[in-house]
Amino acid sequence: MRDVRGFRFSPRGRDKRKSFGGPISTEPRINDRIRVPEVRLVGPNGEQVGIVSIGDALKLAQESDLDLVEVAATARPPVCKLMDYGKFKYESAMKAREARRNQAHTIIKEIKLRPKIDPHDYETKKGHVVRFLKAGDKVKVTIMFRGREQSRPELGFRLLQRLAEDVTDLGFVESQPKQDGRNMIMVIGPHKKKAEAKAEKAAAKARGTEQEAAEPAEAAEEQAAQPQ
């Protein structure tokens, strides 16, 4: 293909610019990758050694069979610490893994009530709220108004107050009652965190399993103790 001046060019060769470099590493520089004349050195137990040349710092690391790790690159001079970097990375990874495993997300459950709910239905709904709060979940309580009930919002407000007082040992009012169209909404948060609730449930289950395992042995001992 030719342009207006008669020179040949390839359409696929219009832009052969190369992109240099790769993704920026988030890991600290260690040992001979630290390219500065001097560093502020910290010992393996956190003791302050002071400002030393990079050569002396590397020599101390080699003599201690440790790594020289740059822990504060923006400081002047950079701060470096003597440590076992492989062990440090492994322990950091284990801590992050444990934190992810123990992390629990709070779930918002929802309960819907009518302003003129009968006592039996109220107790049933309250039981659901109690169960959710014990599990460490938030509860969104919605009062649904219909027809003329919309002119009596105080009925819904009193019902929500009553429910909050009935479960005050397990939760607290996180979001006060507010009107939302034909509904009135309140959010109750649990006193216990989700992780704590899961731990207590697991402990209770373990105790129940131990008790079940012990009962046959106790029965056998009682039977053996009886006179023949």
Image (cartoon, rainbow, N blue to C red):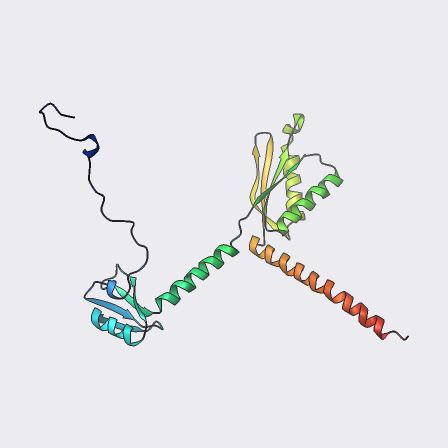
Q: Residue 96 sits in which quadrant? A: bottom left
* Quarter occupied by the C terminus: bottom right
Image location of residue 213, percent across then percent down: 72, 64
* Quarter occupied by the N terminus: top left
Against 178, residue 96 (above or below) is below
Q: Residue 95 sits in which quadrant? A: bottom left
> Left or right of 58: which side holds 189?
right
Residue farthest left in this picture? 5
Q: Which residue is drawn at the image coordinates 58% and 57% (left, top)?
A: 196
> Left or right of 169: which side holds 62?
left
Q: Which residue is drawn at the image coordinates 63% and 38% (left, top)?
A: 157
Image location of residue 160, percent across then percent down: 64, 41
Q: Residue 216 sits in which quadrant? A: bottom right
> Left or right of 139: which side holds 103?
left
Say which of 56 and 51 sits in front.
Answer: 56
> Left or right of 118: which side holds 77?
left
Against 123, residue 82 (above or below) is below
Image location of residue 89, percent across then percent down: 38, 63
